[in-house]
Structure formats: C-alpha cells, structure tokens
C-alpha cells in the first residue's frame, strides 16, 4: 500500500506561479510511473503531466511550456512547477502512482489539492 500526500495548492493571480508537491509514504519512484491529474468542476479528470520511473516526461498540450514535472527520489517527493497560470488552470490537482506487477495493476491517488487562479 502507498499513501500519497499533496501540498502547495492555493489562490494565485493570473500569471502567477505555484509549486505542488506529492510525497509518497515509501520509496516508489524507481518502480512506479507518476503523474499529476486535475479535475475542474463539471469536467472529467485529465492528465496534466507524467513522469516515468526512468524520468521521461509528458505534458498535456494545454500546459506545455508552462508546467514542469520533476521528482526527487531521495525525498520520495514529486513536484509540479506551474508558471504563467491561467484561470482555466483552476481545478483540484491529484497525484497518482501506478505500476504493474505481473498481471496485477496498482493505482494510487492522493486526496487532492485545490488550485484557484483568479484576480
């Protein structure tokens, strides 16, 4: 079992920055693919950014060039640096970890952290 805890959300003005953190209860980054998802009111949850166990990254088109995903294996912590924030970035942001062991898939979620971009 893995617990994921997000932090760093809040209220920020358009054009501002925030850094989200996701800390895992144990060392998983070398065996799990990690990602940040978000869900805005009335919308489905969507992938924002992902990072593989090997460190390869991918981003949603809507955040490319503005958001950066990274991880610190020694701290069991993943980050999402969000710059040039827009009102449409407002959502609850969730941390996710997933892995496949044999034929069984494991999928873990944090509780979410609210990001509100508003003037």
Image (cartoon, rainbow, N blue to C red):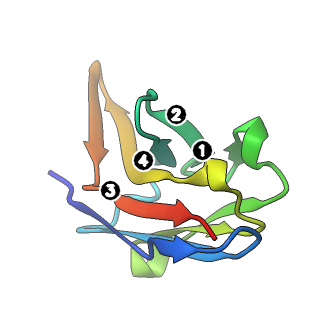
| Nearer to us: label 4 or label 2 | 2
The x, y position of residue 75, in whole percent, is: 42, 81
Question: Which residue is labeled 4 in the image?
Answer: 32
Residue occupying image coordinates x 44% and y 71%: 9
Q: Quadrant of the C terminus?
A: bottom right
Q: What residue is drawn where x is 54% and y is 53%?
A: 90
For label 1, the SS is strand
User: Which comes sooner in the sequence, label 3 or label 4?
Assistant: 4
Q: Which mark is residue 112?
A: 3
Front tag of 1 and 4: 1
Q: CA distance from mark 2 to mark 3?
A: 13 Å
- Please give the count of numbered marks on the rendered protein: 4
Pointers 3 and 4 in contact (CB under 8 A)? no
Which type of secondary structure does the marked residue at label 2 adopt? strand
Residue 10: where, in percent of width, then height? 45, 74
Which of the pair 114/13 is nearer the observer?
A: 13
Marks 2 & 1, CB-CB < 8 Å contact: yes
Q: Are marks 1 and 4 in contact (CB under 8 Å)?
A: no
Q: Nearest the camera: 85 or 26?
A: 85
Q: Earlier in the sequence, mark 1 or mark 4?
A: 4
Towards the viewer: 59 or 53? 59
* Disc on the earlier residue, 4 or 2: 4
**Which residue position is annotated with label 2?**
46
Above or below residue 6? Residue 19 is below
- Image quadrant in which you'd find residue 102: top left
Answer with the quarter of the image where residue 84 lies.
bottom right
Verify CB contact (< 8 Å) between mark 4 and mark 2.
no
Which residue is disc 1 drawn over? 48
Gap in angstroms between the C-alphas marked 2 and 1: 6 Å
């Amino acid at each position: 079992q893995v617990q994921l805890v997000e932090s760093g959300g809040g209220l920020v003005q358009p054009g501002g920055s925030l850094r989200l953190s996701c800390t895992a209860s144990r060392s998983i980054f070398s065996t799990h693919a990690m990602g940040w998802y978000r869900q805005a009111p009335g919308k489905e949850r969507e992938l924002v950014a992902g990072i593989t166990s090997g460190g390869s990254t991918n981003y949603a088109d809507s955040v490319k060039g503005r958001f950066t995903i990274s991880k610190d294996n020694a701290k069991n912590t993943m980050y999402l640096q969000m710059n040039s924030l827009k009102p449409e970035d407002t959502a609850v942001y969730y941390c996710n970890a997933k892995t496949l062991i044999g034929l069984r898939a494991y999928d873990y979620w944090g509780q979410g952290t609210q990001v509100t971009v508003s003037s």
